[in-house]
Amino acid sequence: DEELKEIKKMFIVACGSAYHAGVTAKYVIEGLARIPVEVDLASEFRYRNPILEEGTMVVVISQSGETADTLEALRQAKQRGFKVLGIVNVVGSSIAREADAVIYTHAGREVSVASTKAYTVQTALLSLFALHLGLLRGNICESEAQKFCFSLSRELPEKIDEVIAREDEVRALCLSLSQKESAFFIGRGVDAHICAEGALKLKEVSYINAQAYPAGELKHGTISLICKGLPVIAVSTQLSTAEKTAANIREVAARGADVYLVAPADFPQDGAKYIFSLPKAAEPLLPIIAATVTQLLAYHAALLRGCNVDKPRNLAKSVTVE
Ligand code: M6R
């Protein structure tokens, strides 16, 4: 804790879904602990000689703990004299052994190639870590921390169970989606990164070409691709940006897109063709709950297309080579 109090900057390094968990964590850590966070893909970090200033803590995230690029990033950071914290699922894995400290996610053994529970737990755990940092540095008070902890430990699993119990609704949404060859995901702020992860999942298991964009970026080029019948999955969980995302939804709907909205029931719904209403929950939990919906979308779209959801083509569970 003494060292954590002194951190001036955090550098999060990971690959794939673990990287997306890291980007989501940036929002929570900067919000609760007011520590600037930079997030990098391990395959970029290792070759670009990144600027690591004194007071920087490097955090590597990995389900398997064996990902070659992430392990190499860890080694480089250590060689340069920086402390590395590993957020790892597999106990005793290489990253867990070589990091200066480890927080295990204990998500259980993940069999399927696609990271699902590992990603969700990484995101929840990084929120808890952000909370701890915020408390240590006096940015949040005990009662706020207790409230957030309660939300994470009680409310989050309940709400995710609620979403899973509504799986049939998600499957119904996939009847049309599964027949398409491409899709867009849009969202703002943290939701843009839930979208990036949702798009990765959809591509990975259903082979539908999916692209994610921060909704405000559409006008800068991508909107030219929007056409009749194109599926656009919009994730909107934050009240502060709900109206702005709603405006983007109307723009794509006006150009003929089929909008699938994943948002709380009381958010604007104009322009959405299909809606999955998120259960009522504390706002910081909603992105994680929405991620479960996007995982189910990918899962059912893949099943409906006859794909092997556990073992997608060309992929291995653990990427131990570059
Ligand atoms: O084991 P790791 O968390 O280090 O793996 C990182 C990525 O290879 C992994 O998250 C990958 O992107 C998943 N297949 C995505 O579902």
Image (spheres, rainbow, N blue to C red):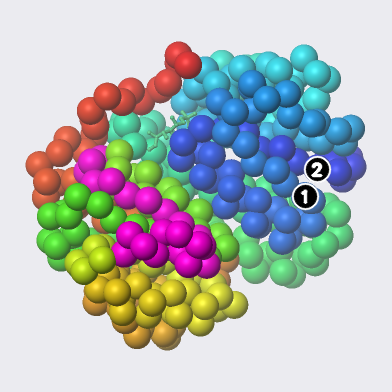
Q: Is residue 221 left or right of residue 139?
A: left
* Residue found 12% across the figure and 55% down from its top: 179
Q: How many tags in the picture? A: 2
Give the residue pinned by disc 1.
36
In the rendering, at what x and y percent does residue 72 appear? 61, 17
Nearer to the camera, 45 or 295: 45
**Does residue 13 sit above or below 156 in this rendering?**
above
Q: Is residue 74 visible?
A: yes
Other residues around mark 2 within 10 Å, as few (<14) / some (14–19) / many (≥20): some
The amino acid pointed to by label 1 is Pro
Residue at 26% in and 66% down: 227
Q: Residues within 10 Å of mark 1 (few under 14, many from 20)?
A: some
SS of the residue at dot 2?
A: strand
Q: Is residue 242 magenta?
A: no
* Residue nearest the observer in this picture, 12 or 111: 12
Q: Are marks 1 and 2 in contact (CB under 8 Å)?
A: yes
Q: Position of residue 4 (x, y in %)?
A: 83, 41
Quote the CA–CA distance across marks 1 and 2: 5 Å
- Residue identifier under label 2: 9
Please state the quadrant of the image where ligand 1 appears: top left
Quadrant into which the N terminus falls: top right
